[in-house]
Image: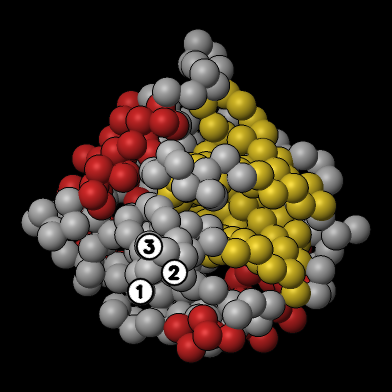
Amino acid sequence: MPIHLTSRRHFIAQMGIATALVSQEAGAAEVDEDLIAILNDTHVGGKHPANASIPTHLRETVAYLVGLPKRPAAVIINGDLALNNGQPDDYTHFAKLILPLREAGIPVHLTMGNHDDREVFYEVLKGEKPASTAVAAKHVGVVQTARANLFLLDSLKARMVAQGLLGQEQRDWLEKVLDAHADKPALIFAHHNPRLGGEEKHFPGGLEDSEALWEVLAARPQVKAYIHGHIHHRNYFEHRGIHILNTPATSFVANPKESTTGWTMARLSATGGSFTTHTHLAEHEWNGVKVDLQWRA
């Protein structure tokens, strides 16, 4: 996919998509095949924003990941990469900030949020644009890891529109690739929160076709969790047996009394996952908190 963020990715044409295979190269640093890093809402601006902590937080997170004794099998940055409305300088600065991950050989996979601009994103990070389009005007993919298949969706309805939307074509594509990859637990990643299984005050800015999506997910027992950002908070819910993980933003929060910034480390097993929150404020009550989830049968 265009900057090439993962030198370890091998792409296979399958069902019109590029499937990212996470594998260890000979001579490369040792990989913890069960470990995945989850970031979202980086909101990086090319022109230094008033909140200078935004790029600092991402630098700290990247430094943590690069400094791990074993590198994670994948890093997912789940939407709202850009500060406000997806300007070229935003993605140029973002690419520089995550460059140490690439240099360390850590695979990085990106999704789109409502503050991103898909076309500008492709213009700047040329390696991210797939050779063939699986879903028209959507940035989607499948990442295969040792313990789970990760399905990356594009919930960007329109730039600077809070609500998200997958659309019929993307849901049809998801059905096909889920059925083609039923061998392992499936974790679904999209920027927007679903409008179910959570707090109603968050629903207005969530995914408009949540119910239709859940019909696809609930009917497939390999689907175990839906992981999103967008809220700039941290919650764990469940709907029809599927875990819903609202992971913290890297950039900023609306109410520091309720939330803080950070990232999530997921350790996966055959039957579930342990999700540990790391915060930029070392003394915050969320820091180091681990939630153990069991997958539905």
Which mark identifies residue 114? 1
Q: Position of residue 39 (x, y in %)?
A: 45, 50
Viewer-nearest of labels 3 and 2? Answer: 3
Res 24 → quadrant: top right
Viewer-nearest of labels 3 and 1? Answer: 3
> Where is the C terminus found, in terms of image quarters?
bottom right
**Crowd around label 1: few <14 · some 14–19 · many ≥20 (10 Å):** many
Are the residues at dot 3 and dot 2 in contact (C-beta closer than 8 Å)? no
Colour option used: secondary structure
Res 61 → quadrant: top left
Which mark identifies residue 230? 2
Q: Position of residue 210 (x, y in %)?
A: 61, 82
Residue 141 vs residue 296, the one in the foreground: 296
Label 3 belongs to which residue? 256
Residue 4 vs residue 203, the one in the foreground: 203
Identify the residue at horizontal 17%, vertical 51% (top origin): 52
Q: How many angstroms separate mark 1 from mark 2 (CA)?
A: 9 Å
Q: In the rendered view, does 148 fall on the left or right side of 241?
A: left
Vertical placement of residue 71 versus 83, above or below: above
Q: How many angstroms separate mark 3 from mark 2 (CA)?
A: 16 Å
**Crowd around label 3: few <14 · some 14–19 · many ≥20 (10 Å):** few
Q: In the rendered view, does 119 fall on the left or right side of 230?
A: left
Res 214 → quadrant: bottom right
Element under disc 2? loop
Residue 56 vs residue 285, the one in the foreground: 285
Q: Position of residue 103 (x, y in %)?
A: 33, 26
Q: Earlier in the sequence, mark 1 or mark 2?
A: 1
Vertical placement of residue 110 versus 107, above or below: below
